Image (tube, helix red, strand yellow):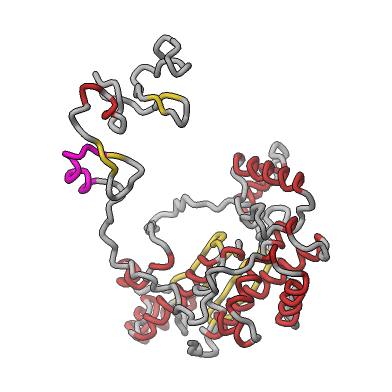
Amino acid sequence: MAAAALTPHGTVFPEEGRCGYFVEKKKRFCRMVVAAGKRFCGEHAGASEEENARKRILCPLDPKHTVYEDRLAKHLKKCNSREKPKPDFFIQDINAGLKDETEIPDQLVPISSLSEEQLENLIKKLRKASEGLNCTLKDQIMSHPALHDALNDPKNGDSAAKHLKQQVDGKHRKKNSVFERLQIDIQHLCLNKIPLLSKEKLPIVGIGKHLCGVATDLALRCLVETYAASCEERNEEPLAKRIKNDKTEKEINTLAKEGNEKNIPEKWTPVAGIVIALCCHHRCDWRHYVGKEYFRALGLEAVDFHYFQRMSSWATCGMRKTTLEASNSSTKRRDKQNDGSEEHDDGGCRITDDSPESLPGFLTVEEKKKIGHLCKLLIDQGRIKYLQQKGFSPALQYYTDPLVSLENVLLTALPNHSSSPETSA
């Protein structure tokens, strides 16, 4: 580092090899590396006397950075913000759902501004709509054998144990396995356009670890409408069934004797199963929600859905009793992020005008939590009904202890071979 000496700005000189431009807003020198023999980085080269003849302008693709005006054409061809060619499996809004004529108004009164009477009426609507729903879910808490030794290691404290329980092995070292990562918003993903799937025509299993709010609905529609429906329309058979149909009777009998034939399904569906860890219901969106029919059948509207999804955050934020506790909670969340813990534990809730502290005081903390859970359950029930209409047998269950994650509900679905899917608008 260069010898420290005070400048007119009251700070030391820039580090050796670093940009000499003083960023007034940050009260320090720019920390970008400069080219050999240069005093300023490319971004601040215009500040150099020898570079004054060349003008730098804002990039038209991204005004967060600048470029030499005389090199703009070349820059636009390689700028990271340029529009890149869309892959074949990108189809704009294919999983977005139809735009509803009764969209939620742009300006809605926040929950904190509702009168006590209005809030009571909303809660009455919620309780009436939830009558008959099973509020007690089955515990299906399991643990992979690979984690047993680490979980039982006395050297690991509570935080380490919790962290281990939240992990999924993403290395997939199994031989002959093919993995492909697609960087695309689920809203625009057309699975049957993916070369591997369209070529092999294999049944798929959809797995999602905490698909926040609307992402769950987009994923469900991607699986059971975009992919499954397209395969059925083309009357395609899976690889396993084609193999079976191509076999001679002798080969089939031989396989049956060896016990291998049981691996070839008698009845096939494009989607073999769905497993989604649910979370962040307050991030749901009426347009994309798959349970609209269910809500309408209960006499509920888009505005009711809006308030229910906002109130759902009470399930994970309703325990806050004071601003001080909220502050402590934020500190704990930062600590959790530092040690790699689950980022969804608090439902992504922040202190806003819809937070429990700013609501009418006629509800206790426990009542708010129960109402929040009821909102989550009602929204998830709409997803259950949707999957049933599409020919699946869905279920909700707890997959982990709430001490590990407050967002601990799992949605699973298997194809129901005994009935054909119903058509839904």
Dividing the picture into quadrants, the one containing residue 3 is top left
Percent x, y for residue 223? 45, 73
- Drawn side of residue 24 relative to residue 152, left or right: left
- Does 340 sit above or below residue 305? above
In which quarter of the view is residue 95 placed? bottom left
Comparing 240 with 284, the one in front is 284
- Residue 148 shows in the view: yes
Magenta highlight on residue 74:
yes
Q: Position of residue 218 (x, y in %)?
A: 48, 70
- For the N terminus, the quadrant is top left
Q: Residue at x 29, y 26 (%)?
A: 47
Residue beneath the point at 71% across and 66% down: 372
Q: Check the image and report above or below for 17 versus 126.
A: above
Q: Which residues are magenta?
A: 67-78
Q: Identify the image quadrant of residue 398.
A: bottom right
Q: Is residue 258 visible?
A: no
Residue 331 in the image: state x and y as whole percent: 68, 41
Of residue 208 and residue 218, the one placed in the foreground of this image is 218
Q: Is residue 320 left or right of residue 18?
A: right
Location of residue 310 in the rendering, given as x and y in whole percent from the top left corner = 64, 66
Residue shown at the point (60%, 39%) measured from the top left: 338
At 44% from the left and 10% from the top, the residue drawn is 5
- Against 68, residue 177 (above or below) is below
Magenta stretch prevailing secondary structure: helix
Number of dots carrying numbers:
0
Query: Of residues 418 and 342, which is closer to you in this image?
Result: 342
